[in-house]
Image (tube, rainbow, N blue to C red):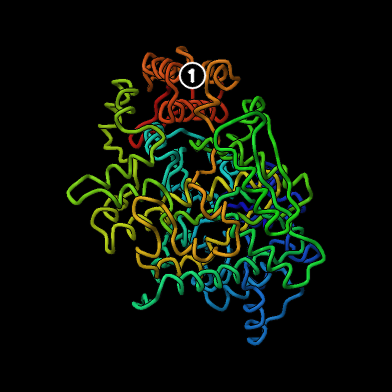
Amino acid sequence: MCRIHGSFNARTTAQEMRDVAARQHHGGPDAQSFAQHSGWALGNNRLSIMDPEGGAQPYRLGDITVVFNGELYNHDRLRTELIRQGFHFEDRCDGSILPALYLTYGDRFAEQLDGMFSVAVMDLRGAPRLVVATDASGMKPLYYHWEERSGRFHFASELPALLGFTDVRPYEDELGLHTYLSAKTPFGQRTMFQGIDVLPPAATAVVTREEGLHLTTRRMGYESAPPVPEDRSLAQAGKELRDILSREVSRLLVADAPVAAITSGGLDSSLVTALAAQALRDRGASGALHTFNIAYTGNWPGDERVFADEVSRHTGTVHHQVEIDPATFPDLMGDVVRHLGQPNADPITLSTFSLFRAVRDAGFKVALTGDAADELFGGYARMTQALAAPEGADWAGAYLDHLAAVPRSLRDHLYTGDYAASVHAHGAAAMPPGLTEILTHGTGSRLQRICRIEQRYRLPAYHLRRVDHLSMASSVEARLPFCQPAVVRYAATLPDRHRTIPGTGVKRALYRAADGLLPDSVLNRPKQPFTLPITAMLAPGQRMWAMARDILSPQTLRADGRMRYEAVDALFAEQAAQPSDQASLALWALMSHQMWRTEFFGSSGAASVRTPELAVAL
């Protein structure tokens, strides 16, 4: 696991490469290195997980140079095949196979990989060309800046690192605020910075001096699923799913560093925990699995520690109950905003950051999580509500509004006249091209289309980037069994009746897979999202309330010019008088956005802002 960065067709200095590496040192504190020649540079920060004594990057083989971020779970099989073809390897590190794999398969090398990754290949056999690729789920992001006029291309694993290149100047996308409030974070390739994009999942981009940037996407797991056996029962589906998950969890436990598990107390992470604990016992491991759960000092809604503790006792793990004081949250927000690089409107960011820091402090470098199960199996309330809507109703519009940090009716009320006119004038669609068409006119059932949207757009942008950045902020590698290609493909074969029970959010096949592995109290409990109780915490008398009032002051909002300060003030009054999830999340989202602007554009807020047509100063 590492962080990578580099440039092509640019005059990048050695000091510049060191400066960029320093900005993402937390994601690779064990070693830093780079290769640099006329017109290109590739760099790496290493977090040693596999073969700590080997695997020095960049990897080189003749005229091929590679840097790599991630884990490859099929590297042993690929290495054996490549040895048969005459290649030789000095170590057993997973990334060491990549130059030979590229020489064998060319630009399609990433199709052979099973794991989470972002890879950059410099090919100097003829005219220089840079090839970058990402995994099928988007677990390992890669941000890039390409200047079409000059042909300069820069990339990095994190946004703050990318901004360390002198050729990459930070400009706020003025319309990004609208996108952010509409989806909690930009979807697709967009970021909150004008001119900076992120590679989508399953993408391969080739950059040459002659032809510029050419980006293609590979088929994703749900697009290549085998036909559904019509006579497959729910019991059979549950058994098959358990077998697949058991195999994948066992593979993800392999590491040359200590491995733990995150156990929230819900179905998804608890099932991963149970399978991991069983796998360690089956292989005769000397010690028990260590599990981590987070809770908050005091009495807050949604506390899951009792369920996590039951799972630990049931599965025989060594349990770590992490407790953090909400009074410290305002002090954490600056770190979280900086590591994310752009706003994410989920309050769970603070808990995620604190949880992985506790995992690191306990001596673990790897943690298995239960993320992505809801996207695969239809577990979110917004999905079941969309399924329950009658034909003829605008279920798609209601579903998209559920993705928002601030629903459309409230956004229209909050925007100033000038900003609303700017959004309208530029035809600013908050969602990427094609998303709405897939949802309303795509192939498959309503649930299949919704799951496709969740996996292709929301999961990588809103969920996986958050997990990646906030785990690696503490030098912890998060491994996600539910994102494994075998699991994704199998979920796509399930008929709707086996994925979820309409109106309940019950993930039927997943529950059947967990039957007998988890306590009945966990299996039968009502579904509860893993989140921060922000509605209760954002209240008069709490530190977070005072912080929000200060950050969203009338003076700040007037200087920004996009939010009506009197409408935001009314939102505070509403939250004080009658607390609600809608009002609290809206205030949280606005506060997070303003903190991001301050972090990356200065306390005055006088950042340069580029629209597609012009640059203006706010």
At 27% from the left edge and 43% from the top edge, which residue is drawn?
Answer: 397
**Quadrant in which the C terminus appears:** top left
Residue 191 appears in the rendering:
yes
Q: Is residue 471 above or below residue 373?
A: above
Decide if residue 464 is on the left or right side of residue 352: left
Q: Residue 608: percent from the left, percent from the top?
A: 46, 27
Q: Residue 252: percent from the left, percent from the top?
A: 65, 65
Q: Badge 1 is on which residue?
A: 552
**Quadrant in which the N terminus appears:** bottom right
The 10 Å Cα crowd at callout 1, few under 14, some 14 to 19, many 20 or more, is many
> Hey, what amino acid is under mark 1?
Leu
At 74% from the left edge and 54% from the top edge, which residue is drawn?
Answer: 290
Which quadrant would residue 173 be assigned to in this image?
top left
Query: Which is more toward the observer, 273 or 336?
Result: 273
Q: Is residue 97 above or below residue 601?
A: below
Which quadrant would residue 564 be assigned to in this image?
top left
